[in-house]
Image (cartoon, grey):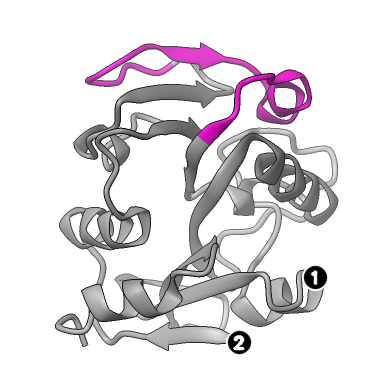
Amino acid sequence: MRKLTFPQTGSSELQVQVLRAICGPTEDKSLIDLCCGSAPQTSQLKFRQKTYVDAVDRVIPDGKVIVFNVLDYLKSETMYYDISISTDTIEHFRDADAKTFVDRTSRVAKKNIWFTPLGEFCMTIDPENNDPDTHKSEWTPEKLEELYPDQWSYLVFPNWHPTLRNSKNEILGAFFFWNGDDFERVKDELKNLG
């Protein structure tokens, strides 16, 4: 497993710094931001072209949101992007839909970057709850590695949310994961973080 762990607590600035490192040069690349929310981080990244998709109509600083169920959108999307970014999203899907989300995303972009809480946090167990803002699954590098052996690289921040606690009263962490063969380059770019 290609994995690095960092002690830092999270911030918007750190999230953008890590996304920049994982993306590499982007000025001539295209981006699809899936479940973009208000795009606070991706709007700070420079891309030749950006596409934003979310189930909820949002206002974002540098574009317009395509309002669509992301799973249906990915099924019908015919564009191919250089990079997809999906932050704080996979946990909003139940396991089977989350796996479908990951699988379909890999068909529309060369590099796929994800960011999610480390383990469970505020999960609903109500199978009828379809509110897009609730958490319905939990993720760890180990769980992803079991589903997708040796496909992802991981950057783990176990102290990302120092004021939030999971059900075991532990600090809520978070992690990034992405596909590609650039783990060593990203590691080198982030060597001064840890």
Mark 1 closeness class: few <14, some 14–19, many ≥20 residues within 10 Å: few
Please say whether residue 156 is visible from this viewpoint: no
- Which is more N-terminal, label 2 or label 1? 2
Q: Nearer the viewer, residue 121 or 63?
A: 63
Q: Residue at x 24, y 53 (%)?
A: 16
Quick check: 168 above or below 62? below
Q: Residue at x 48, y 50 (%)?
A: 88
On whether residue 74 falls in the magenta region, the answer is yes
Q: From the image, state whether disc 1 or disc 2 is nearer to you.
A: 2
Q: Give residue 52's position: percent from left, percent from top.
A: 45, 23
Q: Give residue 103's position: percent from left, percent from top.
A: 76, 48
Which residues make up the magenta segment?
Answer: 58-81
Q: Residue at x 27, y 43 (%)?
A: 41
Q: Looking at the rendering, which quadrant does residue 19 occupy?
A: bottom left
> Circle 1 is placed at which residue position?
147
As helix, strand or loop, the secondary structure at mark 1 comes to helix
Placement of the N terminus among the 4 image quadrants: bottom right
CA distance separating discs 1 and 2: 13 Å
Label at residue 1: 2
Label at residue 93: none
